[in-house]
Image (cartoon, rainbow, N blue to C red):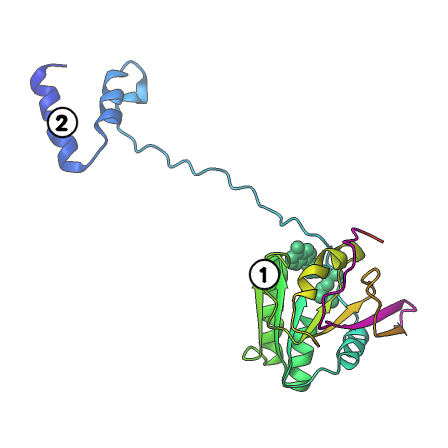
Amino acid sequence: MKFLEIKLLLILCAAFGVSCTQTQTAQTNSSTPASNTTVAAPTVSPTVAAVEPRLDVPYVPTHELIVDEMLKMANVKGTDVLYDLGSGDGRIPITAAKRFGTRGVGIDLNPQRIKEANENAEKAGVTDKVKFIEGDIFKTDFNEATVLTLYLLPNINLKLRPQIFDMKPGTRVVSHNYHMGDWKPEKTKLVKTPDGIEHYVYLWRVPKKKPDFKQETNQ
Ligand SMILES: C[S@@+](CC[C@H](N)C(=O)[O-])C[C@H]1O[C@@H](n2cnc3c(N)ncnc32)[C@H](O)[C@@H]1O
């Protein structure tokens, strides 16, 4: 390519904002049929693999009868602030908001569950009372709660215990099915749902003085 042609090419590049390197490459590879056509380099976006959140507990919703029992055992009122850790479709905070006008917050790591919970809050007409946070229960602050509800697993309850002992004394903690190791519940109730399945509901109250339990990992 002659000097003048190159100069002209550079002027055109500048005028149209085209990458000169690409154009020049296309020009110099003119032995291949399509190579003398200047094409925009394809925008190769990195393949974004659908990232599944690493859940500590699988999703199993609490039966409505057990939700009722949990709210009853914790004596939930309109003045409470209820946090459900691992809130699934939001049924516990939504039921408390509908029934007692309780302000509620649900925390769940799975965006699909957060979407469902927001849709359910909308249907129940309680979006002014409840909110759902997509986050990890071990990294999200729930100290504001006066009632904490859990349907997790025994080892996750034990892992949460230090965070729970840091909450305001008197905060009620209700757990569906799973205990807290050597932190003995104030109340325990066995409830049978119509499908014949037995469920335990436990209640604790955050003590004034942090108990000196050794950190258990499982039971
Ligand atoms: C057994 S379900 C309970 C759902 C709801 N609380 C109920 O009782 O119907 C447990 C929930 O915890 C959520 N989860 C699991 N690990 C979590 C974590 N580390 N942080 C936040 N949510 C988590 C799951 O996505 C699931 O929705």
**Residue 164 image point, x, y percent:** 69, 65
Horizontally, residue 122 falls left or right of residue 28, namely: right
**Residue 115 image point, x, y percent:** 58, 64
Answer whether residue 161 is magenta in the image. no
Crowding at mark 1 (Cα within 10 Å: few <14, some 14-19, many 20+): few
Mark 1, secondary structure of its residue: loop
Q: In which quarter of the image is residue 193?
A: bottom right
Horizontally, residue 111 falls left or right of residue 18, namely: right
Residue identifier under label 2: 10
**Observer able to see residue 121:** yes
Q: Point out the frontmost of discs 1 and 2.
A: 1
Q: Is mark 2 within 8 Å of ligand 1?
A: no
Q: Residue 210 carries which label?
A: none
Q: In this view, does 195 lie above or below 32?
A: below
**Residue 41 image point, x, y percent:** 33, 32
Residue identifier under label 1: 140
Q: How far apart are marks 1 and 2 (CA)?
A: 56 Å
Q: Which amino acid does label 1 sit on?
A: Thr
- Mark before the other along the chain sequence, 1 or 2: 2
Residue extending furthest left? 4
Q: Which sits in the foreground, 132 or 141?
A: 141
Q: Which residue is drawn at 84% across and 61% down?
A: 182
Q: Magenta segment, principal secondary structure?
A: loop
Point out the stretch of residues depicted in magenta: 194-217
Q: In this view, does 206 lie above or below 14?
A: below
Q: Which residue is drawn at 79% across and 79% down?
A: 73
Q: Looking at the image, do the residues carrying marks 1 and 2 touch, with CB atoms under 8 Å apart?
A: no
**Residue 6 image point, x, y percent:** 12, 20
Q: Which residue is drawn at 41% across and 35% down?
A: 44
Q: Ligand 1: give its quadrant.
A: bottom right
Q: Does the residue labelled 1 lie within 8 Å of ligand 1?
A: yes
Answer whether residue 202 is magenta in the image. yes
